[in-house]
Image (cartoon, rainbow, N blue to C red):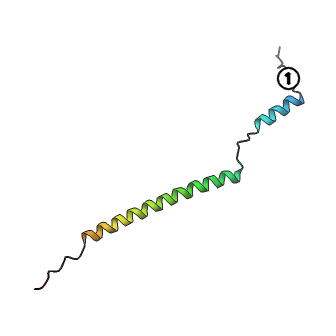
Amino acid sequence: MTKKTPIKVIKRDERNRKESAVEDPQRKSAQETARDMVGTVTNWVNEFQQKRRTETTRTKRAIQALFRDPAQPNEA
């Protein structure tokens, strides 16, 4: 003998409550999500470029300090 599963009656109000509970008010649209991702990546790129600029400046100063022209002696 096969057991039949009981049928559950869902009233309209209950169905509407479940549907409204599923919708997340915090959920962002696809455009907002994409905008957030672009902003994050843009910040990463800016930070990387700034770090690279400071390292380049330091390297340039170090090279200039190593290869300075020697001071010429005064002729008396």
Image location (x, y in percent) of residue 73? 14, 80
Q: Is residue 60 above or below residue 23?
A: below
In the rendered image, the quadrant that contains the N terminus is top right
Which residue lies most toward the top here? 1
Left or right of 41? Residue 53 is left
In the rendered image, the quadrant that contains the C terminus is bottom left
Image location (x, y in percent) of residue 12? 89, 30
Residue occupying image coordinates x 57% and y 54%? 40
Which residue lies most toward the bottom here? 76
Left or right of 44? Residue 15 is right
Image location (x, y in percent) of residue 61? 32, 68
Q: Is residue 64 above or below residue 42?
A: below
Image location (x, y in percent) of residue 38? 61, 56
Which residue lies most toward the left here? 76
Task: Determine which residue is flagged by label 1.
Answer: 8
Residue occupying image coordinates x 82% and y 16%? 3
Which residue lies most toward the front here? 76
